[in-house]
Image (cartoon, rainbow, N blue to C red):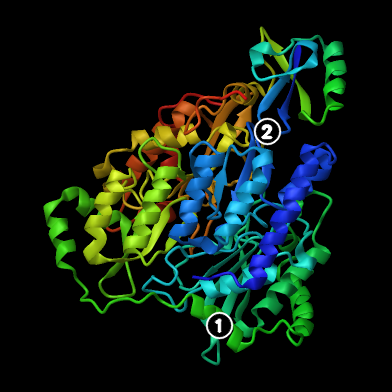
Amino acid sequence: MYRYDEFDHALVRERVAEFSDQVARRASGALTEDEFKPLRLMNGVYLQLHAYMLRVAIPYGTFNSRQMRQLAHIARTYDKGYGHFTTRTNIQYNWPALTDLPAILSDLAEVEMHAIQTSGNCIRNTTTDVFAGAAEDEIEDPRPWCEIIRQWSTIHPEFSFLPRKFKIAVIGAEKDRAAIRTHDVGLQIVKGEDGGTAFRVFVGGGQGRLPHIGQEIASAVPAADLLAYLTAILRAWNLLGRRDNIHKARIKILVASVGLEAFREEVDKHYATLRHEDLRIPEEEAERIKAYFAPPPFEALPKTSAPFDRALLADPDFARFARNNVRRHRQAGYASVVVSLKPVGGVPGDITADQMDAVADLAERYAFDELRAAYEQNLVLPHVKLDDVPTLWRALLEAGLATANADLATDVIACPGLDYCSLANARSIPVAQALSKRLADMDYQEKLGPVRINMSGCINACGHHHVGHIGVLGVDRKGEEYYQITVGGSPDEQAALGDIVGKSLPADEVAPAIQRTLDRYLQIRAEGERFIDTVRRVGPDPFRDAIYETLDATA
Amino acid sequence: MKIVTANRLSDGRVIYAGVDNQPVDGLDQASVLDEATAEIVLAEVAGRPDIFVNPYLVEVQDHAPSGRDRLKERIRATGPTVGNSLVRESA
């Protein structure tokens, strides 16, 4: 993985020093909250319901055991012994004191981590396929390009005061495991006309109050021109985008209002100039970055593993874990293992400091010291020898991290909601927990197969409810929590926004209504259909009927 | 009736204006004020930004939040309703 060079080290250290001074001035009263707020937001610090919240960047979700141990140390020393993985593959601490922030950032800098650009109106952490470098279907590892984007976008003077935040995701396969079309810019690596690396570019995707699916603006931008093209997009938006209304400032609103063709013309105008300037990525520089992401020293192994196969036969619980949480790997004899942070009744994405240490140890021992954070709020050990998977599984069991529900109904994505967030209208976590307990039967979940359920506690949609196969949005009705349900959303290469099925439900009706929806699917599915396939075939009506069949009038 | 609440500068924790407008941790220690007095206290604590961050008024009945934001204020007062930090610690 990428290692900081002297410039990265200097930049992060300078930022720690600068922000430490700003914190000291805030603590002394020399800076008011209004003066301090934009400064803290440039450093990932929010003021939430109960405390400050610090969001730490995990660039494109890739990190190592030393970094994970430091995250555990921070959780223990400055927080309440846990952290929370987010849908932007970052980690949040819910309880740090203002006066501890300099020490935390200094600890992070020791392991090449920071909180820069995890909040504020700038280019946020670039996300990617959690199986990058491991997936069978990958054309090329997207992470070197994510790193190039990170270097270009970090404290970029032109793009530090954008109309709103800006999010980029990159994938290297046709299968979209990073929800690129829900991003301001989504990039898909393709082969260009000359056979070289190129990018298919989607623009204007986004969730929130006014959701849009990204539209294809370019089919094959040559890799060397990637930064010129991104600069052209951002420049067009930065010049034309609205700044008078926070809800209409994202690029999706601009693209929707002027239309894709007109926006493309605008971008092309800038691109025509920019591509001849010094933004071209020299091939040797791209190769230098790619070298950081070279495959680990895999052993030449047979495709199958006797210890793995023996464990499958010997232990039905292991067999279940293998069916649901172990993914095929491009290298024979290896697999990727999903570490679910969704135990039955747990808080989606939460992990204790002890569990962080346990995962760090396992990554070091069994996965070439590499860890990934998934936007689904899980972790992944990307490169594990099949021979080692049974032992790894037993260790995960001991750490309480072996829930075999990856991509199943209880693998719920949920924002922190009104339990923590000052923007929320309703709680997300208790609704997710109630659903998790109700659907806990693993046989039932496996019968259902893959289904993505997403919950957000407000229309900002941090829980990505618009693109959940089943989405749940918390709303406020005269001081009471109600939940609007959508069906048929999808975050992948067939990205779609879900349909709102009807009136919102009170909190305790949500889990039963979702179970009825899933039961209806079991009744009407055709051979081989996943939940989302059935919804696409029959539309939302049968599910609407199931959701409301036992309910009287609700709000 | 109203109470005055804010977050504490040093650690962001929820505080209220109590006796003599001193910051207190518990909702039960917050001074319950009529509308006019509440506005005066709000202005007073707003002048102490070294302690009170973003102060505002909360509608209460019998010392319990009763306005439109009552759920949010209850959660602020008692801590998250779920998860890894159920017990609200005091400073």
Residue type at mark 2?
Gly
Q: Position of residue A14 (x, y in %)?
A: 72, 60
Quarter of the rendering containing residue B17 = top right
Residue drawn at 66 percent across, 82 percent down: A225
Mark 1, residue position: A288
Q: Nearer the viewer, residue A433 or A55?
A: A55
Callout 2: residue from which chain?
B
Relative to A86, say whether A516 is above or below: above
Number of labels in the image equals 2
Residue type at mark 1?
Arg
Q: Position of residue A146 (x, y in %)?
A: 57, 70
Give the crowd class for mark 2: few <14, some 14-19, many >=20 residues within 10 Å: many
Disc 1 on helix, strand or loop?
helix
Residue drawn at 12 percent across, 56 percent down: A313
Question: For this view, does A111 lie left or right of residue B62?
Answer: left
Relative to A133, say whether A46 is above or below: above
* Quadrant including the C terminus of chain A: top right
Relative to A248, say whether A233 is above or below: below
Callout 1: residue from which chain?
A
Mark 2, residue position: B12
**Numbered mark located on residue A183 in the image:** none
Give the crowd class for mark 1: few <14, some 14-19, many >=20 residues within 10 Å: few
Tag 2 near tag 1, CB within 8 Å: no
Q: Position of residue A495 (x, y in %)?
A: 52, 60
Q: Position of residue B74 (x, y in %)?
A: 61, 21
Report whether residue A407 is seen. Answer: no
Real-space CA distance between mark 2 and mark 1, rounded to the nearest whole angstrom: 44 Å
Residue drawn at 53 percent across, 77 percent down: A189
